[in-house]
Image: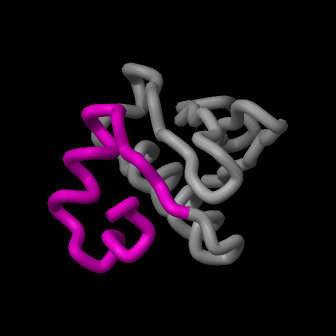
């Protein structure tokens, strides 16, 4: 699985691909220069339960860590994932 990031001044996304085919997308909106809001996660029905959402979330966490950013998870999937995984919570807005 490959996850690609698209980013501009206001919005961005992490899109997952398996064998070159798009399987999911996680979108975010910038909230200032230091934070972004994960607002939506969508995974193709045929790929549910295969870890696509988690891979996109891990890509978002890696991006935040490497760039000194914080995440506000408004999307239910992202919010639940952060609550379950203490090791990811260092990038959450306090």
What is the quadrant of residue 40 in the picture?
Answer: top left
User: Exactly how many numbered labels are in the figure?
Assistant: 0
Give coordinates of residue 21: x percent, y percent: 69, 31
At a point 58% along the width and 60% down the height, the residue shown is: 59
Magenta region: 70-94
Q: Determine whether 75 is above or below 78 in the image.
A: above
Report if residue 15 is visible in the image: no
**Structure colour scheme:** one colour
Q: Residue at x 40, y 24 (%)?
A: 46
Above or below: residue 18 compared with residue 44: below
**Residue placed farthest to the right in the image?**
8
Percent of width and height locating residue 52: 45, 45
Report whether 9 appears left or right of 45: right
Residue 63 in the figure: left or right of residue 88: right
Residue occupying the point 61% across, 53% down? 1
Residue 19 picture quarter: top right
């Amino acid at each position: 699985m490959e996850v690609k990031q698209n980013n501009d001044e206001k919005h961005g996304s992490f899109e997952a691909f398996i064998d070159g085919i798009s399987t999911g997308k996680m979108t975010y909106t910038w909230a200032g220069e230091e934070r972004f809001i994960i607002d939506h996660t969508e995974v193709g029905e045929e790929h549910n339960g295969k870890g696509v959402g988690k891979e996109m979330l891990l890509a978002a966490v890696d991006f935040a860590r490497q760039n000194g950013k914080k995440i506000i998870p408004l999307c239910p999937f992202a919010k639940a994932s952060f609550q379950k995984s203490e090791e990811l919570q260092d990038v959450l807005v306090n």
